[in-house]
Structure formats: C-alpha cells, structure tokens
Image (cartoon, helix red, strand yellow):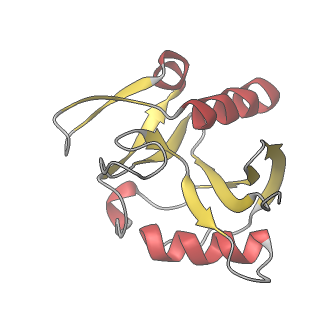
Amino acid sequence: MKTQPVEVAIAILHTSDQFLLQLRDNIPGIVYPGCWGLFGGHLEAEEVPEVALKRELIEEISYTPPSLLPFRRYLSSNVVRYVYHAPLTVEVNQLVLGEGWDMGLLTLEEIRQGECYSENAGEVRPLGSIHQQILLDFIKERF
C-alpha cells in the first residue's frame, strides 16, 4: 500500500539581500539535523498550506508576515513542499526563536556556498540540500 506524501509549508523570509534561516536542532532522527533550513512545518489534518505556514511562523519565531506569496511547489516521492515568500519587516532581534538551535540572516554568498557560521553552535553548519536548492531557484528568478 502506497503511503501519502507528507505535506509541509515553508517560507522564504527575506530582506533586500538576505534570507532568514533556522539552524535545525542537531537531533538524530529529524530531517536535516544540525543544518540551516527555511522556517515552516507540517500541515495538520485538513489545513491549507498558507494557514499552516502562518501557524508555524508564530510557533517558531513569533512572526506574522504582512503577506505570504506563493513561490513554488516541490514534489518528491515522500514530501510535498509548498513554498511561499514574504518580506522580513522586523529586525532579527525582535524575533523569538521557539524552535531550533539558532537563526540568522544568510547572504547570497553563504547560500551559494551552502554553509554559514552559527554563534550558538560555535561552528560553520551546512544548509539542508533542498533548502539551498529552493533558495537558489528563488534567487535566480527574483534577483
């Protein structure tokens, strides 16, 4: 019996030239442990992606973007990712990290390199591969 793919909604939150990412907890068993990734999460039963993403952003960083615009949908054999983008209209120090190891604004160069230093981790950590690809697609299309 074929299982249904997991559905997630994720956000590209950006300033004019930087992107807000979360350093995921370094816990074995989670997806992309200890890697930089986009904020967001799983859709709950009968939840639409935009509503799920707004809920996740409140839970993860206490932030409600002024608008969420759809970017793309990424399909794999086991995950459907609904990707939205929105401006980050507050300073990072105004956000409250409720989930993850760290957060930070990454530059275009750091995204292209696929890694960024984390103060909390005390070391350079990689970007999750799918998150890097999504950001590179967005950068190519929008910048």
Q: Which of the pair 128/3 is nearer the observer?
A: 3
Residue 32 drawn at (x, y percent): 46, 42
Q: Residue most toward the left? A: 122
Q: Residue at x 38, y 56 (%)?
A: 92
Residue 35 horizontal side relative to residue 64, left or right: left
Q: Residue at x 43, y 68 (%)?
A: 61
User: Is residue 121 positioned above or below 98 on the image?
Assistant: above
Residue 32 in view in this figure: yes
Residue 143 in sight from this viewpoint: no
Q: Nearer the viewer, residue 17 or 13?
A: 13
Residue lying at the far front of the rendered structure = 1
Asked if 38 appears above or below 1 in the picture, the reply is above
Quadrant of residue 64 within the rendered picture = bottom right
Q: Hey, which residue is sitting farthest bottom in the picture?
A: 46
Which of the 4 image quadrants contains residue 95? Answer: bottom left
Which quarter of the figure is the N terminus placed in? Answer: bottom right
Q: Position of residue 28 (x, y in %)?
A: 33, 48
User: On the rendered structure, is 71 left or right of 128?
Assistant: right
**Figure quadrant of the C terminus:** top right
Instruction: Find residue 104 and report its horizontal and vertical position in percent.
Output: 38, 45
In this view, the residue in front, 22 or 13, is: 22
Q: Is 68 positioned to the left or the right of 19 in the image?
A: right
The mark tally for this picture is 0
Q: Residue at x 75, y 29 (%)?
A: 137
Which residue is pictured at 35% across the width and 58% down the height?
A: 100
- 133 relative to 1, above or below: above
